[in-house]
Amino acid sequence: MRTPMMVRWPQKIASNQLSNEIVSIHNSFPTLASIADGSVPDDRAIAGVVQSILLLGENDKPARDSVLFFHDDTLLAIK
């Protein structure tokens, strides 16, 4: 299950940067919260991880090397 992701942040994220690394939509909330110096709730499970090091070019590898895809309680895919 691959879907393109585009991010634009002038002076922070290099233009024309391309990566084939694993990033999940679940990472958006914790990543944006971290960039904004915010936090995620600690009273529930949050599936995503902060991926700002990949987006900002500080590392060429993501914070997670796999993604599980569920529909309801059924595991449908692992990457």
Image: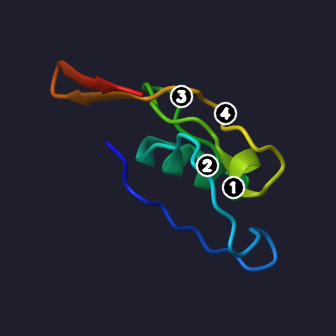
The amino acid marked with disc number 4 is Ala
Q: Nearer the viewer, mark 4 or mark 3?
A: 4
The amino acid marked with disc number 2 is Thr
Q: Which residue is mark 3?
A: 42
Q: Which mark is residue 31?
A: 2
Q: Secondary structure at mark 1?
A: helix
Q: Whole-Å distance between the Cαs marked 4 and 3?
A: 19 Å
* Label 2 or label 4, whichever comes before in sequence order: 2
Is disc 4 surrounded by few (<14), some (14 to 19) or many (20+) residues within 10 Å? some
Q: Secondary structure at mark 4?
A: loop
* Label 3 or label 1, whichever comes before in sequence order: 3
**Residue at image location 71% in from the left, 38% down from the top:** 61
Q: Which mark is residue 63?
A: 4
Q: How many marks?
A: 4
**Residue at image location 51% in from the left, 51% down from the top:** 28
Q: Nearer the viewer, mark 2 or mark 4?
A: 4
Residue 35 drawn above or below residue 12? above
- Residue at the far bottom: name it: 10
Q: Which residue is mark 1?
A: 55
Q: Secondary structure at mark 3?
A: loop
| Residue 31 locus on image (x, y percent) | 61, 49
Is disc 3 surrounded by few (<14), some (14 to 19) or many (20+) residues within 10 Å? few
